[in-house]
Amino acid sequence: MDATSYSRRSLHPTGRILTAQIVRLMDGYPREVRVGQPVLVVVLAAASVAGLLAKLVRALLSAGSGTGRRSFKELKKGPEYLVTPVRLRDADGRLYEVELHGHLPQSALHPADHVQLTLRDQGDPDLAPKIERIVNLTTGQLLRPRTATMWSHLGPPLLLQAMLGVLVVATVAACTAVT
């Protein structure tokens, strides 16, 4: 076997905390957040009640055009977030690979920085652990990558409209129960 053609395979760390040196930040790629259809249906149904009430008020006041709403298909697709594979080398010389989900400031991490990572398993043995928290021991920075969530994808206006719809349905149900 030729020693020059042998490439070292990176490992997935098994512990929750990993202290190592960054070898390489690889090119990122997008991954989609899953949006559960039952949750989406409930939110849209509740928002529809408030939407019908708003359309009725607009029609009575003849207040022009309505707002554009995203389709069910667009909402179901979910937001994308950046996944950046990161290669690390520990003090024993072992090469590890982990995933950074979301964005960090461009100057936050560099090759050769010593870091302490808090990791979380992603549930799939083929996927490298996800970084939850980074302590850059070289610069002293504490970093937390942030990604889009299902709730940020749906957006505050739609969620507020859904809460209003639930209140309207609850009020109507309470009034019919009293009579």
Image (tube, helix red, strand yellow):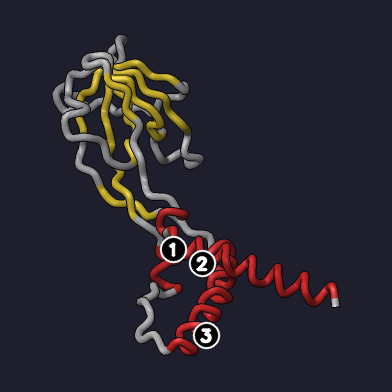
- Using the image, determine if residue 92 lies above or below residue 101: above
Q: Give above or below for 177 relative to 115.
A: below
Tell me if residue 75 comes above or below residue 91 in the rendering: below
Location of the N terminus by quadrant is top left
Q: Which mark is residue 161?
A: 2
- Outermost residue toward the right in this view: 179
Q: Which residue is mark 3?
A: 56
- Crowding near the residue tagged with mark 1, few <14, some 14–19, many ≥20 C-alpha atoms within 10 Å: few
**Amino acid type assigned to the residue bearing label 2 in the image:** Gln
Question: At 47% across and 34% down in the image, what residue appears?
Answer: 121
Total marks placed: 3
Residue identified by numbered label 1: 157
Whether the residues at callouts 2 and 3 have beta carbons within 8 Å, the answer is no
Q: Amino acid at mark 3?
A: Leu
Dot placed on the residue nearer the N-terminal end, 2 or 3:
3
Asked if one can make out residue 158 in the rendered structure from this viewpoint, the answer is: yes
In x, y percent, where is residue 103? Answer: 27, 40
How many residues crowd around disc 3 within 10 Å: few (fewer than 14), some, or many (20 or more)?
few
Is label 3 in a helix, a strand or a loop? helix
Which one is nearer the viewer's eye here, 123 or 78? 78
At x 18%, y 19%, the residue is: 112
Q: Nearer the viewer, residue 158 or 79?
A: 158
